Amino acid sequence: MVSKIERGEASPTAALLGRLSAAFGLTMSQLFARVEGGGGLVTRAAGQPTWRDPATGFVRRSLTPPGGAPLELVWGEMPPGAEVAYPAESYRFLAGQQIVVIEGRLTIVQGEDTYELGPGDCIRYGPPRDSAIRNDGDRLCRYVVAVLRSAGG
């Protein structure tokens, strides 16, 4: 699959990118930054790496300037009816992550627990468990993810 992606014959899904980045001990933002290059203290909106999941329409935009800071901010847009699943190993190397909903509704499933979030609601992820993010609403959901990498990550 990696060869197909490199040759432009396939577009990776969010789930696949999560597994690939985890295999390298990187967040998806770090993986994109290595591919895109760049650096500096400011990343203008027009220059922020944006990626769309071909399977779901989910959009992910890296807000944080590349450069290895331990905190990363990511903008997410989840279309109505879309769902992205992440296996626990996708974020086992992170010190923590939180999601705050800006607009719309978002359902977070962590293991056996399900959380319904609306505008202004925030969730802190617990220990790594299989999880999913989905939009059960009837309009686009916009949210921000704060990712804190482990000291060695």
Image (cartoon, rainbow, N blue to C red):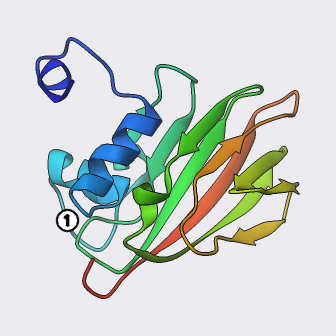
The residue drawn where x is 83% and y is 30% is 139
Residue 3 drawn at (x, y percent):
11, 24
Secondary structure beneath dot 1 equals loop
Give the quadrant of the N terminus.
top left
Q: Is residue 142 left or right of residue 69?
A: right
Image-quadrant location for residue 84: top right
Give the quadrant of the C terminus.
bottom left
Numbered circles on residues, count = 1
Image-quadrant location for residue 110: bottom right
Residue 132 drawn at (x, y percent):
64, 46
Q: Is residue 126 left or right of residue 146?
A: right
The residue drawn where x is 25% and y is 84% is 152
Density class for disc 1 (Cα within 10 Å; few <14, some 14-19, many ≥20) is: few
Residue 7 drawn at (x, y percent):
11, 17
Q: Residue furthest front?
A: 112
Residue 49 visible in rendering? no
Q: Is residue 85 above or below residue 153?
A: above
Residue 9 drawn at (x, y percent):
21, 11
Q: Residue furthest top?
A: 9
The residue that mark 1 highlights is: 39
Camera-side residue: 126 or 124? 126
Q: At label 1, which amino acid type do we have? A: Gly
The residue drawn where x is 35% and y is 46% is 19
Image-quadrant location for residue 50: top left
Q: Is residue 103 above or below residue 126?
A: above
Residue 84 visible in rendering? yes
Q: Is residue 146 left or right of residue 48?
A: right
Q: Residue furthest bottom?
A: 151
